[in-house]
Amino acid sequence: MGAEQGSMIGSFLPLIILFAIFYFLIIRPQQKHQKAHKAMLEGLTKGDKIITTGGLIADIVKTEEDFIKIKLNEDTVVKLDRAFVAKKVDSGENA
């Protein structure tokens, strides 16, 4: 019984190692990125410059619970779902 159990663990060891590599190279970094993106979305305020997932660059006019109002140019203000904000443009970046 002892030798049979040892060979079973030995046959699953490569699978366990593969899962560990997969976790540390793919799953964990993706979770960190999602947390950082969520924190960025919650920290958006009036006057911030953002880039939408559609590639539009806009300034935030007003933040609401699920939506934000953004100014595309001097005349156009639209409402955007927070989920469609790709990133916040830092003041040092050109957009």
Image (cartoon, grey):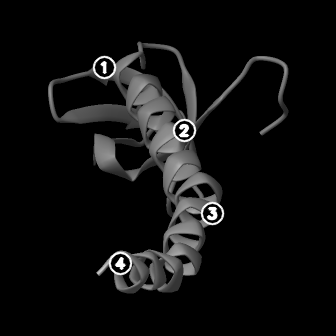
> Which is more toward the observer, 3 or 87?
3
Between the C-alphas of marks 1 and 2, the distance is 12 Å
Disc number placed over residue 5 in the picture, else none: 4
Could you tell me if the residues under marks 1 and 2 are in contact, i.e. CB atoms within 8 Å?
A: no
Judged by depth in the image, the label closer to the viewer, 3 or 2, is 3
Give left or right: position of 52 versus 24: left
Discs 2, 4 touching: Cβ within 8 Å? no
**Given the image, on which type of amino acid does mark 4 rest?**
Gln
Is the C terminus in the top left, top right, bottom left or bottom right quadrant?
top right
Report crowding for label 1: few under 14, some 14 to 19, many 20 or more residues within 10 A (C-alpha).
Answer: some
Q: What residue type is labelled 1?
A: Lys
Rendered view: 23 above or below 88: below
x 43%, y 81%: residue: 3
Mark 3 residue element: helix
Residue drawn at 19 percent across, 23 percent down: 64
| Residue placed under numbered mark 2 in the picture | 58
Task: Give the residue pinned by disc 3.
Answer: 21
Q: What element carries label 4?
A: helix
Camera-side residue: 45 or 5? 5
Q: Name the residue under label 1.
A: 62
Q: In which quarter of the image is the N terminus?
A: bottom left
